[in-house]
Image (cartoon, rainbow, N blue to C red):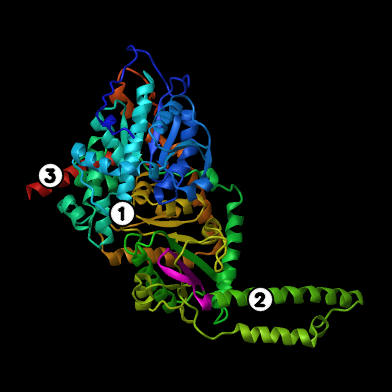
Amino acid sequence: MNLDSRTKRTTHRVLPIGQVIKAGADPAHAPLIFEVSWEVCWQAGGIYTVLRSKAPAAVSQWGNAYWLIGPYRQAAAKIEFEAHPPHGVMAEAVEELRSRGVELHCGRWLITGRPWVVLVDIASVTRHLAEMKYFLWKDLGIETPAGDRETDEIVAFGYTTADLLAAVRDRIGQRPMLAQFHEWQAAVALSLLKHRRVGFPTLFTTHATLVGRSLSAAGVDLYGRLARVDAEAVARKHGIGHRFEIERAAARTCDVFTTVSEITAQEAEQFFGRRPDALLPNGLNVRRFAAPHEFQNLHQQGKEQIHEFVTGHFFPSYTFDLDRTLYVFTAGRYEYRNKGFDVFIEALHELNRRLKSEPNGVTVVAFIIAPTRRHGPNVETLKRQAMLNELRSTCESIQEEMGRRLFRTVSTGRLPSTKDLMDEYTRMQLTRMMHAWSQGSQPTVVTHDLVDDARDPVLSHLRRRGLLNGPDDPVKVVFHPEFITSTSPILGLEYDHFVRGCNLGVFPSYYEPWGYTPMECIVRGLPAITSDLSGFGAYLMDHFPDHDAEGLYVARRRRVSFEATVYQVAGWLHALTCMPLRKRIELRNRVERHGQAFDWSNMTRYYRAAQRMAFEKYYADRDILPRETPQAPPDAYKSAAAKHGARRSKSSADRERRSSN
């Protein structure tokens, strides 16, 4: 790697005034669009979902001019990546870096849309790491400590990406290009390019601020004291000062600064000293989830599979009516407070109290799906599922023999009795199975043996509230401390089928810059609870005036007490238990109808607006990305732009008032 390239200056040339290059023009002149992320072809967090789901819409717009850049991870690449030789200027730029000893993998990401990707083998450049870190300090004033392996890899990735994009810029002549960098892990390259004055527009997108996430995880009232937070001091205290500096440098030097929600925009303005220029709400590839005219059937099929687990887990101890059982769940990273697990458990406690005082015959089984440190499935859970499988196998063999006996009896012209259908051995076999099936012990709350069972926050909270699956508790809890897969020996079904089989998703997050889990529920036709402290919840409040009535519930957490939020969530849960089947079906229908609103075919308009803003800063005389004809919003939606502007003005006024006080 040639580190002297840090001093290179590139001057971009422009076409004569009035000449137009548009996105759909000659491929040799169409803009080159790059997205840089630590999660390209590697599922490490929520940005992976953003990029993966958005890819079909991006490829549809930009075609082969759209490229993603990420790190090479061999295990992930074996599944998600297919090697192909690059084309055009990309081939030349890649070859230049390879001549310097940089190992790059070019090809297609094996997802819908099959976008082009370049994956950087970080190991091939780590021999230059000490030099990179020195010049990062010398040129940008960012000092990185020894021993932080992740940051070291990110620095190496940043220098290589900057060199690659600079090599592309040197070769494109008058052709426009643009690069968008996601999160602090991709930020080093952006700051380096600006320092070298490589001439093309850049966007930086923060999906969650490092300081905001750290404070929220520590239990600090982030939103109540946001205006008083000293971001640098907090970052140093939490040992992420160097990472914060990388993040802040990109936010301040990029041409267009973006984030995913108004909530995160407020954090960014306070922590970085720059208000985001645009908001980029996330979307989904709804076609992947859509099942027109089938989603109700899929709900029933998924529910039957959950019924089987519940039968095995609870029925050896006691039984309840599965036809009057509702399934609710929460899922996500194990961030007890940030993800709202504390609110969920408190709401379950309140629901249990209400259903005990005024029984309506409904049982609620609540699942908590959050991976944490565990040894493996506990013996009791596995034993119960094994017994269920044995019981099913025995009954299926008896059923076959009973069928033959039934046929022989009816063929003689008489209705069968029990003795005709089962002989003495069969009755004894069933009796033994039933005795073995009846355990008597209380069903476990957690399905696995945890590494620190005694101090686990979720288990401790459940114990404190007495949610321990007693026979007289209408609310049962199953804590599954790993993600759901079809190969699991416990639940044994795909996450998609599990979600479709439930009746409600509950995600009352405290810190959630966007929040994909409730959106994924909605596009599957499942009612969901989010919160007004999540980006997605704020988006619902902006665009769906009757969101709560439509099954798109937004729990109020901003400027309200914890108890008030709990009672609101408990109220929605209780209302669901009182809802007749026909009303629940109607609710799912209403929710499913809103799914298309979150498809990337609609949501990419925010990205196009931000890209247009960046292009106009560099190519003011060229209509590279023409403005779209404004469309009137559907009657059911509010004007997001108007509300965003009003909130922004109010936010500024609040800050001025605080300053004067």
> Toward which corner of the image does residue 12 lie, by quadrant?
top left
Amino acid type of disc 1?
Leu
Nearer to us in this view, 209 or 408: 209
Nearer to us in this view, 247 or 230: 247
SS at mark 1 in the image: loop
Instruction: Residue 433 in the image: state x and y as whole percent.
Output: 67, 83
> Magenta stretch?
362-381
Instruction: Residue 245 in the image: state x and y as whole percent.
Output: 22, 45
Disc 2 marks which residue? 390
Asked whether the viewer can see residue 79, the reply is yes
As drawn, 542 above or below 429: above
As drawn, 557 above or below 279: below
Instruction: Residue 109 in the image: state x and y as whole percent.
Output: 50, 40
Disc number placed over residue 441 in the picture, else none = none
Amino acid type of disc 3?
Glu
Disc 3 marks which residue? 656
Separation (CA) of disc 3 from disc 2:
70 Å
Number of disc labels? 3
